[in-house]
Image (tube, rainbow, N blue to C red):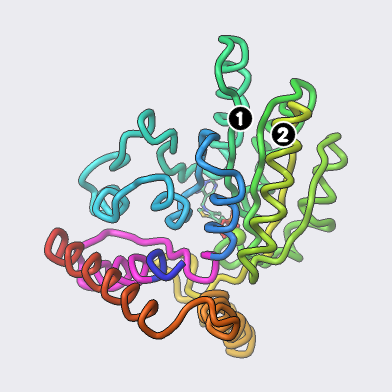
Amino acid sequence: MLVARGIDEEARQLQKQGALDLWLSCQGQEAAQVGSALGVGPGPTVFPSYREHAVALLRGVTPAELLAQWAGRTFCGWDPRKLRFFPYTLVLAAQTLHGVGYSVGQRLQGREDFVVVYMGDGATSEGDMSEAMNLAAVESASVLFVCQNNGWAISKPTEEQMRTSVAERARGFGIESAWVSGQDPEAVFSACFRAAAHVRGERAPYVVEIQVGRIHGHSTSDAQEVYRSPEDIARTRAADPVPAYAARLSGLGLVDTAWFDAVDAEVGELRERLMKEYA
Ligand SMILES: Cc1ncc(C[n+]2csc(CCOP(=O)(O)OP(=O)(O)O)c2C)c(N)n1
Ligand SMILES: [Mg+2]
């Protein structure tokens, strides 16, 4: 979580300096991403949206590869086949159908078909998302949909997008689901571990909705202060899962200052390398 936070912050700074064209921050969503990626393990093929930076790093994407697309150097940056982590998809919800189709195709060829699809709350308003959930249900596809609900689709709040939770909606398609808070990486890990066992055991889809907070604007081109109240932004920042989990682990005596110093040094080195490569 700390490495993802550091790299995300470096990318934001590089964008401000004009080295990147755009950056979509994952800050506030690290517990959801690390908990889910570790909960499902290294087995499944992942179809991300566009801000799953912590998941990408855990799947072996290097920080330099992660930034390449946003500097306009390549369409992707990493080798999707080697890492089984597909390119970021900016067409909302398109990856949900890609993921279901891929899973069914792999199954027909007698290969590993467990797929994890990431999407935001806003993406669930797309028709593709309903098609993907229905297709996954009727085909009994081995797809785990992970919805990071950060409460916003750019400036559109969730309450103006849906009348039920995404988890509840999944059941209308005949898909089992769970809702979990994205403040606690261990709770996310457990929910996704159980969901992965369901997908593997039942060979059936599953939806996990993770409630998260978006600390920064939608992208570096978005001033969220225009449409979000200062209190709302302050609440989200106060509930930041990264310092909260650091404090929890320290309190339990599982990590000490020397450990944090070592992580800081590692993050500093990674940031330095990114600066040299992109600034
Ligand atoms: C098909 C489509 N329509 C509209 C957009 C413009 N757009 C980009 S991101 C976004 C909001 C997405 O919100 P959400 O799915 O909640 O993801 P978040 O950015 O909050 O992680 C919109 C409307 C798009 N990229 N693709
Ligand atoms: Mg959102």
Mark 2 = which residue?
199
Quarter assignment of residue 266: bottom left
The reply to whether callout 1 and callout 2 are in contact (CB within 8 Å) is yes
In this orientation, which residue lies closer to the viewer: 66 or 253?
Answer: 253
Q: Which stretch is magenta?
A: 6-30
**Percent position of residue 132, x then y:** 68, 32
Disc number placed over residue 145 in the picture, else none: none
Whether residue 185 sits left or right of residue 90 in the image: it is right
Q: Amino acid at mark 1?
A: Phe
Q: Position of residue 38 (x, y in %)?
A: 55, 51
> In x, y percent, where is residue 248?
59, 81
Nearer-the-camera pick, 93 or 64: 64
Q: Is residue 240 above or below residue 151?
A: below
Residue indicated by mark 1: 114
Q: Is residue 250 above or below residue 202?
A: below
Q: Quadrant of residue 233?
A: bottom right
Quarter holding the C terminus? Answer: bottom left
